[in-house]
Image (cartoon, rainbow, N blue to C red):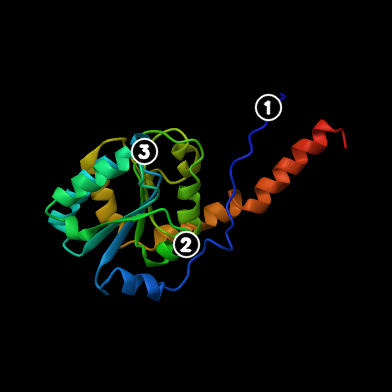
Amino acid sequence: KNVSLVPRGVNTNKFMQQEKCDELLLKHNIKKNEKIIITVANLVPVKNIDFLLKTYEKICIEKNNTRLFIIGDKENQYGKELEKKAKLSKFSDRISFTGKVQNISDYHSIADIFVLPSKKEGCPVSLLEAMSSGLPIAASKVPGVKDVLEPFPENMFPSNNMEKLKDLIIKLLDDKSNGIKLRNHVIGNYGIDKEVSNHESIYKQCLNL
């Protein structure tokens, strides 16, 4: 009875649907017909980005108009190894490692889908931010992610099932309605104001106010 769970919250006014960022479209030479897949994660093994790279190769065989952007700190051994693997891929010209960036919402604006292939999570803020931005989601069915996406089982794939992830990404690349439902879910349950209010309530209970 003395335990309270306060889910993480995100700024739904900052992370929202917006016009595509022209600066990024020009910087990365993104063509109008290209579909953009993004993931946001510091590059450590638990984030399972090597699995995403292998899955992406399968996607490229079926869809030749996709690009993959891997966004997050890459200045470690795992990150450097991933970049080397990507350069050896026959689809290397479609894979971009941006490193750590401050303008995540701008990358959301040019994306068609957000992918979270993690082996495990706590309460994944990058997932909530992408949902708040109205992006379709493909995420591994692991603790933490399941808590957030419980009402949307169709957006999860069995962990490390490459075929399921490939099929889910291809399906969602053309389904914008999915992103609208996900944003509404974040607004109703994971807004930053709700997180602050829940914390205030707990402190008041502790102080008997």
Q: Are marks 1 and 2 in contact (CB under 8 Å)?
A: no
Label 2 is placed on what type of residue?
Asn
For disc 2, the marked residue is 103
Horizontal and vertical percent position of residue 183: 50, 57
Q: Secondary structure at mark 1?
A: loop
Q: Is residue 151 left or right of residue 203?
A: left
Which of pointers 1 and 3 indicates the residue nearer the eye?
3
First in sequence: mark 1 or mark 2?
1
Q: Residues within 10 Å of mark 3 (few under 14, many from 20)?
A: some
Q: Is residue 55 visible?
A: no
Horizontal and vertical percent position of residue 49: 30, 43
Q: Residue furthest right?
A: 209
What numbered label is drawn on residue 44? 3
Q: Residue at x 45, y 59 (%)?
A: 104
For disc 1, the marked residue is 3
First in sequence: mark 1 or mark 3?
1
